[in-house]
Image: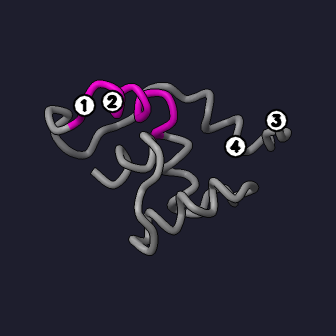
Amino acid sequence: MSKIPPDHRLYLKRRTFAFRCSIDVFPAEELEALAQFGNWMEALARGAIQPVTAEQEHFLRVDREEADPATVCERAWLR
């Protein structure tokens, strides 16, 4: 496993994700993914932190609708 940069850790520690839509549309596994990683994904998507892995680069392509989602996190983020 690669070392997690300190700026990424900051967002990964945050557990209260502010949903900007109804949570009724999310399956349980996607709700869990957003609760755990939502703040980190938001920081990555808005450029507050930079991608450090190929998977994170893929997430950004998914966010820009240039690639199809391949993970629960990516599906949840698009929903």
Q: CA distance from mark 1 to mark 4?
A: 26 Å
Residue that label 1 marks: 27
Q: CA distance from mark 3 to mark 4?
A: 14 Å
Q: Measured from the top left, where is residue 40 in percent x and y?
A: 56, 43
Check disc 2 and give the amino acid type: Leu
- The label nearer to you, 2 versus 3, is 3
| Secondary element type, mark 3 | loop
> Does residue 28 appear left or right of residue 41 in this picture?
left
Q: Measured from the top left, where is residue 48 in percent x and y?
A: 61, 58
- The label nearer to you, 2 versus 4, is 2
> For the point 20% across and 44% down, which residue is it?
21
| Secondary element type, mark 4 | helix
> For the point 64% across and 54% down, which residue is it?
55
Q: Are marks 3 and 4 in contact (CB under 8 Å)?
A: no
Q: Quadrant of the N terminus?
A: top right
When the figure is inspected, residue 18 is found, relative to residue 51, above or below; the finding is above
When the figure is inspected, residue 19 is found, relative to residue 36, above or below; the finding is below
> For the point 61% across and 33% down, which residue is it?
12
| Secondary element type, mark 1 | loop
Check disc 3 and give the amino acid type: Met
Q: If you read the primary sequence from the N terminus, does the residue marked by circle 2 or circle 3 appear first?
A: 3
Residue that label 3 marks: 1
**What label does residue 8 carry, if any?**
4
Residue that label 2 marks: 31
